[in-house]
Amino acid sequence: MPAEQIAPHRLSRSDMTVIGTLLVASFVVILNETVMSVAIPVLQKSLGVAPSVGQWLTTAFMLTMAIVIPLTGYLIQRFGTRTMFIAAMTLFTAGTVLASAAPGFEVLLVARVVQALGTAIMLPLLMTTVMTLVPEDRRGVMMGNISVVIAVAPALGPTLSGFILDHFGWRTIFYVVAPIAVLALVIGASVIRDVGERSSSPMDLASIPLAVLGFGGIVYGLAAIGESVEGDAPVTPWIPLVVGTVALGGFVTRQIILQRTDSALLDLRVFRSRAFTLSVIVMLTGMATMMGTFIVVPYFAQTVLELDAFKTGLITLPGGVVMGVASPLIGRIYDLRGPRPLVIPGTILVAAGAWMLTTVSVDTSIWQLLAANLVLCLGLAATFTPLMTLGLSSVPPQLYSYGSAVVGTLQQVAGAIGTALFITVMTVVATNHREAGVPSAQAIADGVQTVFIVAGVMGIVLIALGLLVRRPAASDGSVSGPEELDGTDDLDGSADNKVAVN
């Protein structure tokens, strides 16, 4: 094959440096998010705050993510890759340093919000850059590398946190993360350059409060449902849910109007692609299952099996390693075969992992939890990587940043839905059984069993949705075009999947 035909399919050293730096930075910010999952009870005790107050260290982080991510599509196009990277890592580094020196809960809470501001920008920035720089026939492999970051960091976080908490103080968590963040910021500032098209359209200020109230209200309301069944919610969950729903309706309506003149804060024309819409629905169902599971299993391990923080963290580590090892291979398979040979077995494995956990009891061994987590994580790896690649590849390049923002935003919402659903079911069943005279540990185990029956049913729904995903059209064995579910997967009614974006 002539060299000129091969060259477009190769990434330059400069492009690889940009993507590699973004991968390392994303790993750091995701690792920070998950190390706190095991640390919250320790922080509550150390800082002398009630669980309902201490939980805000997690809730505030999640709320900030849900509010900021919808804005990232516009911000990346308006200010460029380099500026947004420096802003994201500067905020994250500043929040980490502030957290390490926090004299009390209030300052630590502010530090977590500042960290979340940076974290919310990084993943959409990474995905947008990859979609812009990487040729379509190599996106599966590159998205597999992104999946390594997304998988290994969350799995390593609880284990690292558990080890640090068992041997050192909680501030050491931030001492470990801070220098890596500084290094990533310094290197990134020197090598990251602007990629993709820029937009000079002004920000629609009226959309911002609608986004804040809409996404923030819904995510907080969902989080409050789980807290309310435990008696810790400071407000009735239905108030923020209603406010959020109304505001979100206003936000969506305004974006539909503004996108006619290419001035939307979050361009929703990405949903005109059936492949993108279906991919998002399947991913979000899987995300809800995953986040609910990752909350309930450690809780069960600590309260029923009485494992310490470090051993609890070890339960998630092998699954994350398996996801990390498998994801690049899964990406290569996607580039050669498309999504269907991966998504169908992947969704089956997710459902199988959930059903394996329906048999947990007070006598369950750690090995059963490990095995179920391994099966679940392998299924998630086989599902998320191809769907993320397929979904973002099916929208025009001008909308990559908005597609990344939509995926990131809805992942936060799906995670909140899964967490609220699983915690609510577990708590209600456990409470009813305790009131009926069942010992506490057994009552919690019964609640967990019920949770995973729900998760198993969600897994069956996931399989059904996965069957709808079809292989993209390809001319030479590689994925060469956006997914076409029925031959009419376009944005404007034509077959060439084009949209006019000026």
Image: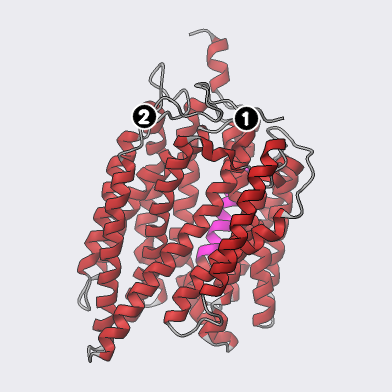
Please provide percent x and percent y for residue 286: 38, 53
Write down the region rendered in magenta: 21-34
Provide the secondary structure element on which disc 1 rests.
Answer: helix
Label number found at residue 13: 1
As drawn, is 413 to the left or to the right of 209?
left
As drawn, is 300 to the left or to the right of 277?
left
As drawn, is 438 to the left or to the right of 38?
left
Q: Nearer the viewer, residue 161 or 483?
A: 483
Question: Amino acid type of disc 2?
Answer: Arg
Q: Residue at x 29, y 46 (%)?
A: 463
* Dot placed on the residue nearer the N-terminal end, 2 or 1: 1
Q: Nearer the viewer, residue 77 or 182?
A: 77
Please provide percent x and percent y for residue 378: 33, 49
Q: Residue at x 50, y 36 (%)?
A: 142
Please provide percent x and percent y for residue 231: 46, 85
* For residue 76, above or below residue 479: below
**Can residue 475 be seen at all in this image of the molecule?**
yes
Quarter where residue 180 is shown: bottom right
- Is residue 27 inside the magenta stretch? yes
As drawn, is 204 to the left or to the right of 481?
right
